[in-house]
Image: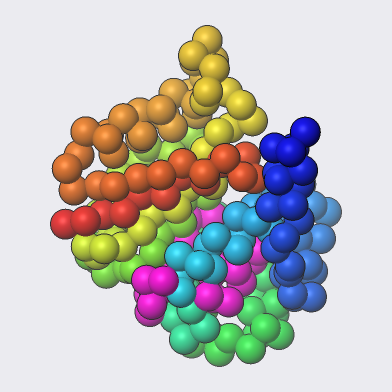
Amino acid sequence: MLEHLDWIYVTDAARESSTILTARELSIEHGVEPISPVIGAQYAVVAASTQAQNIIEIGTGFGVSGLWLLSGAPTATLTSIDDEYDRHEQSKPLFTEAGYPANRVRLITGKAADVLPRMNENTYDVAVVDGDPSQLLFNVEHALRLVRAGGVVLIPHALWKGEVAEPAKRGAVPSALRAIMKNASDDENQVWSLLPAGDGLLQIVKTA
């Protein structure tokens, strides 16, 4: 019972700005699952603790994640990739409303598979991988290439509704998430942690 109360308390502790709430409403209205507030708060903490100046996000959605990231690093430049032009058109004014200049919010419309190989390695402080689940391994590989030493890769939905923890679930996404964690464990240049809040958040620090 105490564990259940703790879980509720942690989940409800994060508070969202009116702009993030608007982005959340847009996401739900269009059938896009946004990160939970508690995961958003962790994004902000990571962005702040790394003193992020350059952030890259795979999967803009309607701006929930990006707004949380910039709340932790308000002087950073956010590069966010999504293959849906309409999402960028609707999220762009929300970044402006939140006070982030247009020249620091770079929205790239296109497939991550086409865009990521053209991005410079060791350039970003934080990378968020929340795009097409079928491209998870590819996107994480590039995210690790793009972040600097000491940079952090954030992967939400890392428990995939309980399927990752269940060995019998051998679908493409839970299998990919297990592989990413194994790779991080085997790589001496990666340190990782899996948080159970909000359907899971995998955090990987690239140490070298």
Rendered image quadrant of residue 13:
bottom right
Give the image's coloring scheme: rainbow
**Boundaries of the magenta span:** 49-72
Q: Residue furthest front?
A: 2
Would residue 68 be counted in the magenta stretch?
yes
Q: Is residue 126 above or below residue 7?
A: below
Rendered residue at 44%/23% (across/down): 175
Rendered residue at 26%/54% (across/down): 206
The location of residue 199, given as percent across then percent down, is 62, 40
Rendered residue at 70%/44% (across/down): 7
Please tell me which residue lies in front, 108 or 208.
208
Q: Is residue 194 left or right of residue 85?
A: left
The location of residue 127, given as percent across then percent down, is 40, 60
The location of residue 193, given as percent across then percent down, is 41, 44
Rendered image quadrant of residue 79:
bottom left
Q: Is residue 134 left or right of residue 100?
A: left
Residue 139 in view:
no
Q: Is residue 167 above or below residue 62?
A: above
Q: Is residue 140 left or right of residue 39?
A: left
